[in-house]
């Protein structure tokens, strides 16, 4: 084998890829690689044998004193420097190592240069990140801790120490760290969590209370995570955040919410808050009780989920108008009809909820149940109407009594005066007969008036459910001779099982008067035909009695037909009292009576029996 040719040391040094130089004890350059001269932009002819400081004259962050110190020290030294060229700023690191001969005599220094621009850039980025993290840690009050399993050393960062209010030099152990937690729940919890983290690597994040070195109680969030190596836990790492102000604010908010909820729950009003889509976001106890649902069930519901479609649409239109105009709706009477058909009268107010920019993001609603008030108002109105009618009847009755009794009194007075002055017995006997007839007429008048009084005063008679058809048959039997004599033809289509709510005596009186009237006012050219029918309509039973009699001129007598002593035909049996009594009896039971008629073709009376108040 051919021996390798010995290459002179100079040529080996010259070809080194890393910029390298040899400096003697006088700090003069004795040898350098081509890469060295390329880096520093010098030539061997101008550099060899000259001071090394001349090589670094274009490099910044570097001083001659630093260079002399590195060259004179027998230990390896490093320093950084930078240079600007056409490609920009570049950083370098020069390493100075002592140069010995084979007898360990110091001959000088070996200098090597590495470009570290990327390292510097990464260091600057790391420094920036650390600065940012420190700033965020300061603002967010988030610290960290680390526990080494092997050395059992616990380390706290500066923020963690600051939260615990200990000195920057404080070095805790695990037991000391746990003792900072408040006795009870917090200390027991952190002990358990730390043990599970060490044994099983179970991570945790828990809000707990500590007592600082200065004795202050603070809320913190302690977190921990295990770091494993080859499946074995080697370190524990965690965060430590001061959330005391946040927790105090949350507790204060909860207290205010509880205070608000307590206040609105005890208001005698239905209170609710809706969002922009009219979904309920808050309801009070009264609203829950009214809708028979819990708060959890009502939250998120709209009126379309709770009320009839028509009522819900009205409410939604009101909501949109309030939020659009920003004008409150105050004290408006509304009617809510629930899905089960139950209706409630409310006095409702709606007020827009405004954000910081003055835009509506919902509304507050308050409703007061006035159903009972409306019922009382209706009852009062009905009572006023009844009182007015009764007063009118009383005035009318007073006029009748005054007129009729005055007429009878004047008649009696005149007849008695004639009797006193008369001498002949035959004339006296005639006057006595006239007095007897006048007395009978007075008794009839008093009986009629007494019947009217009886109807008007018995307004609280109990109503019962009575079979209408059976009552008709009973009246027909009582009038059988009268009806047969007048050859009356009946057409009865009343349902056999139809029941009406009425005062039984009044029902028979009404049927009797209507039937006898139909016969009294029959057309003399034909036999009377009476048609009876009945049907249910809404909350009433309508009983109709039609005849083919003379008929009534309603244009002429329509306003007087139910008046007392009103007659419209030259019938010697007419007293003008039957229809007046029928009307009073019907109204006393909460019903009504109407009439339709055409001259020469007959008359139809419709009696309305009120089935609502049974």
Image: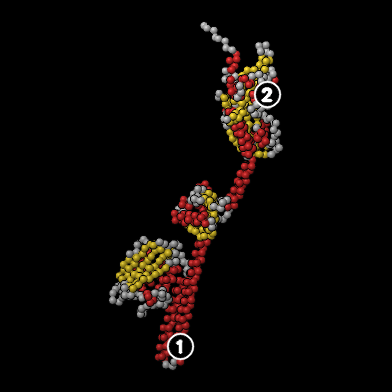
Tell me what residue is drawn at x 52 percent, y 46 percent: 296
Residue 122's quadrant in the figure?
top right
Label 1 secondary element? helix
Q: How many marks?
A: 2
Q: Earlier in the sequence, mark 2 or mark 1?
A: 2
Residue under circle 2?
67
Residue 225's quadrant in the figure?
top right
Q: Nearest the camera: 372 or 546? A: 372
Q: Residues within 10 Å of mark 1 (few under 14, many from 20)?
A: few
Q: Nearest the camera: 158 or 176? A: 158
Q: State whether residue 347 is above or below residue 481.
A: above
Q: CA distance from mark 2 to mark 1?
A: 161 Å
Tell me what residue is drawn at x 57 percent, y 32 percent: 203
In the rendered structure, the answer to whether residue 1 lies left or right of residue 22 reads: left
Q: Nearest the camera: 475 or 329? A: 329
Marks 2, 1: nearer the viewer: 2
Res 331 visible: yes
Task: State the image coordinates of residue 55 (x, y, percent, origin top left).
Answer: 64, 24
Mark carried by residue 414: 1
Q: Residues within 10 Å of mark 2 (few under 14, many from 20)?
A: some
Res 220 visible: no
Task: State the image coordinates of residue 262 (x, y, percent, origin top left).
Answer: 59, 50
Q: State whether residue 192 is above or below residue 555.
A: above
Task: State the image coordinates of residue 352 (x, y, percent, origin top left).
Answer: 54, 54
């Amino acid at each position: 084998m051919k021996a390798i040719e010995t290459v002179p040391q100079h040529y080996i040094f010259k070809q080194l890829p890393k910029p390298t130089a040899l400096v003697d004890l006088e700090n003069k350059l004795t040898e350098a690689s081509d890469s060295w001269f390329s880096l520093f932009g010098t030539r061997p002819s101008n550099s060899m044998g000259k001071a090394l400081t001349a090589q670094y004259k274009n490099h910044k962050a570097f001083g001659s004193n630093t260079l002399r110190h590195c060259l004179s020290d027998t230990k390896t030294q490093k320093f950084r420097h930078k240079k600007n060229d056409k490609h920009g700023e570049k950083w370098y690191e020069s390493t100075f190592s002592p140069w010995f001969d084979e007898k360990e005599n110091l001959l000088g220094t070996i200098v090597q240069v590495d470009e570290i621009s990327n390292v510097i850039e990464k260091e600057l980025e790391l420094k920036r990140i650390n600065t940012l993290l420190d700033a965020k840690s300061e603002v967010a009050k988030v610290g960290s801790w680390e526990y080494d399993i092997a050395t059992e050393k616990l380390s706290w960062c500066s923020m963690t120490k600051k939260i615990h209010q200990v000195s920057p030099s404080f070095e805790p152990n695990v037991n000391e760290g746990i003792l900072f937690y408040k006795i009870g729940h917090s200390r027991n919890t952190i002990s358990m969590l730390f043990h599970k983290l060490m044994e099983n690597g179970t991570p945790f994040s828990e809000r707990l209370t500590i007592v600082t070195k200065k004795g202050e109680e603070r809320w913190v969030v302690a977190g921990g995570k295990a770091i494993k190596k080859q499946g074995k836990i080697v370190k524990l790492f965690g965060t430590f955040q001061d959330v005391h102000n946040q927790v105090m604010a949350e507790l204060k908010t909860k207290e205010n919410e509880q205070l608000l909820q307590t206040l609105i729950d005890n208001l005698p009003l239905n209170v609710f808050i809706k969002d922009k889509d009219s979904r309920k976001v808050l309801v009070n106890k009264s609203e829950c009780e009214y809708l028979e649902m819990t708060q959890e069930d009502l939250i998120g519901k709209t009126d379309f989920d709770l009320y009839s479609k028509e009522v819900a649409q009205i409410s939604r239109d009101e909501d949109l108008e309030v939020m659009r105009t920003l004008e409150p709706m105050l004290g408006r009477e509304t009617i809510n009809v629930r899905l089960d058909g139950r209706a409630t009268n409310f006095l409702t107010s709606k007020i827009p909820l405004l954000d910081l920019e003055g835009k509506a993001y919902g509304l507050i609603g308050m409703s007061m149940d006035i159903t009972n008030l409306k019922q009382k108002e209706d009852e009062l109105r009905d009572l006023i109407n009844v009182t007015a009618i009764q007063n009118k009847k009383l005035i009318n009755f007073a006029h009748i009594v005054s007129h009729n009794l005055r007429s009878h009194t004047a008649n009696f007075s005149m007849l008695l005066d004639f009797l006193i002055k008369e001498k002949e017995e035959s004339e006296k006997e005639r006057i006595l007969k006239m007095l007897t007839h006048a007395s009978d007429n007075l008794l009839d008048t008093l009986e009629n008036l007494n019947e009217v009084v009886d109807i008007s005063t018995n307004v609280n008679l109990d109503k019962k459910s009575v079979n209408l058809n059976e009552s008709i048959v009973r009246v027909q039997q009582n009038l059988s001779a009268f009806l047969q004599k007048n050859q009356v033809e009946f057409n009865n289509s009343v349902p056999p099982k139809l029941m009406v709510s009425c005062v039984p005596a009044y029902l028979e009186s009404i049927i009797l008067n209507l039937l006898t009237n139909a016969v009294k006012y029959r057309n003399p050219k034909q036999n009377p035909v009476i048609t009876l029918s009945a049907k249910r309509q809404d909350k009433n039973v309508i009983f109709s009695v039609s005849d083919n009699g003379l008929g009534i001129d309603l244009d002429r007598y329509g306003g007087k037909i139910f008046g007392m002593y009103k007659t419209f035909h030259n019938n010697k049996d007419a007293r003008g009292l039957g229809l007046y009594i029928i009307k009073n009896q019907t109204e006393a039971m909460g019903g009504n009576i109407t009439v339709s008629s055409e001259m020469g073709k007959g008359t139809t009376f419709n009696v309305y029996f009120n089935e609502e108040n049974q």
